[in-house]
Image: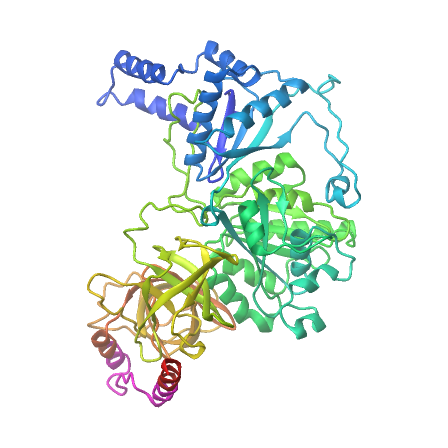
Amino acid sequence: MPDKSDYRITTAAGAGTADALSMQAAGAKKNTKYAVDTSLFDALVEQASGAIGAKLPTKTSARALKQRLLKPDDDDLLFLSDMLDRRLTEGQGEAVIEIGYDVTGDSMDLKDDDVSTVTKSLTIAAQAPEVNAFVQLLFDNAALAVDPQEVTYARQLGDAPKTKSRAKTGANTQTRMLQYLVRRRPAIVEEIMELRVAVAGNVDAGKSTMLGVLTRGRLDDGRGKMRVALFRHKHEIESGRTSSVGMEILGFDKITGAPVRHTDSRRKVGWDQVCSRSSKMVTFLDLAGHEKYLKTTVFGIAGNAPDYLMLMIAANAGLAGMAKEHLGLALALNIPVFVVITKIDMCPPNVLDATLKQLTRVLRSSGCRKLPIAVSDRKSVVMAASRFVSQRVCPIFQVSNVTGEGVDSLQTFINILPMSRPAVATAGSVAPADSALPVSDVSSPTSTGECTTDGEADETLRYDINEIFTVPFVGTVVSGVVSSGRVKLGDTVWLGPDFNGKFVTTTVRGIQRKRADVQTGHRGQSVSLALKKITRAQVRKGMVILGKDEQNTMPHASRTFETEVVVLYHSTTITMRYQAMVHCGAVRQTARVLSIVPIDSKENLEDNVTHDTLRTGDRARVIFQFIRHPEHIAIGSRLIFREGRTKGVGKVLRVLSPVEESQVVHSATKGTMVFNPRSEKVKAESLRHHIASLRGSA
């Protein structure tokens, strides 16, 4: 039974329940040491409620609240506007509202005519200057479910989906529940919410075709017509397989919430125009599915910091091949996953059932520990999106890119997904006294999309570079993600490290976000920067852009760092001098093992290095050393190391200084090898880099 309240509000980052609050109230009564005078508490609450013209949620106020929605006056609209503003602030710019029950558990008994009245009242309240949001009806349980083939892309045929109301039939006595999406309208492009979704899966699972259908708004012809526009290279068009990290965007209108695409059947719309018309922007990262492009796929997942991973599985193939590897990468990097099963129009029912059973068994296994939920209608879509923040829920969609079945549900799910990586739910968040409902809203302290300045001014800028371009009449342009702090137009920053571990000074001469000019790039946003007096040869993937401090001290880059790792799978053992490809954010370089100490060992790494071995499932502190050149790695960042397939995951604990590095190398090799940062290979690369710098300055 739903929560007994006039309406429930769940932010995009969490959902509240009355049970948690009741348990807290019971616990408070048991704690007599810190008992509170209830009469004084009631007087304070009554005084606070009277200051804003609202009362505590009694039975009378619940009926009055219903009247505020059905017959609102100026005071009621002010009350609703203040309520929406609070919920949008707590939800980081968006919230999902449920209306249907009062605090006594009685149904509000909404009729067909009341739905339009409630929608109109909420819309007027959301249009207040302090709110500046739009309201969209997501689900009405009094309407019969519509055939997905009729709903999905019905505008292609020029017909509206047909619905029938069962509120008048009397056959269903279920309480009428309304679910609304409320989202702020951004004033500038910098304030647009951004969601990054990585699309992974086995080869021939229909990843590029799925993105073509979502971003173009047209169905596929069954032969991959919609995937051609997403390919970046000629050989991709010829083979039909993605070999690079592609990028597509899908916006949602800030007036109606409808999808905004940069191309349709009539004309093409630029990315900047999509941004100007949207309140939320979804960036899809199209990853390669073939095994020989695994290095590119891992770099796309680790370097672009996606909020979610959409795992594509062909219904006729099942969870096979690289799909398992991509699922393991998402679990290792703590990225929430939802599954999309494609090609259901050409798959026999028995094969589809076998695929679902296999997928359910894998998701519920001890390695995944996920709770699979089948999503088929709007009600399950909203429920899955609100429960998705727990990271244990894994929604499963069944989609056909040819008939359009399930595409509308998937699009709605992406629209209402939270804007930041889900945080662990915490109980005890009590709604304000004027809200007239007990709600526990859980919000993540950091948002990847909303323009927030809390704490950014105190943070040091860190910008990870994952793409490099040369634009005519502009110069060198880099693309990446702002990990911390913020970057402004005209800032003087550090760029590096080069092959010698040094940083150079440059100036940000231009900033674009989704090809739209902006003045500032905030924490968590993916932006492109035009750098002044920097050539293409001076920049490589994995470099960082750092802000300058007051002392103008050059940052430190190192080849050696200490990590805490867990071996996921290895057929033999991992010993000293073992080499593997390490991925840490945008950094991708081969590293060797200098030291291994089991996690339960109390030996000091600097005094006595143990020569232990690692096997599958072992946990240890490991010191890695990059083979080629130094890198700038943030402490606390997650990493994965692989040798073909993924071997283990870990977290960076600290970066070693040159003195510590020399000692560790000497101890690891028993004095037979001395650390030489100027090896012949490094000298050659440094000379080439120096010549390129001289040419750029000339």
Q: Position of residue 198 (x, y in %)?
A: 55, 57
In-front residue for pair 53/296: 53
Residue located at (56% from left, 45% from top)? 278
Q: Position of residue 275 (x, y in %)?
A: 54, 50
Residue positioned most to the front: 473
**Quarter of image, res 36:** top left
Q: Which residues are magenta?
A: 664-688
354 displayed left or right of 80:
right
Q: Position of residue 231 (x, y in %)?
A: 65, 66
Q: Position of residue 515 (x, y in %)?
A: 52, 58
Residue positioned most to the top: 60
Query: Does the image show residue 650?
Result: no
Colour convention of the picture:
rainbow
**Quarter of image, res 498:** bottom left
Quadrant housing the C terminus: bottom left
398 over 587 or under it: above or below: above
399 over 674 or under it: above or below: above
599 displayed left or right of 638:
left
Q: Is residue 175 magenta?
A: no
Residue located at (75% from left, 18% from top)? 169
In-front residue for pair 456/414: 456
**Quarter of image, res 293:** bottom right
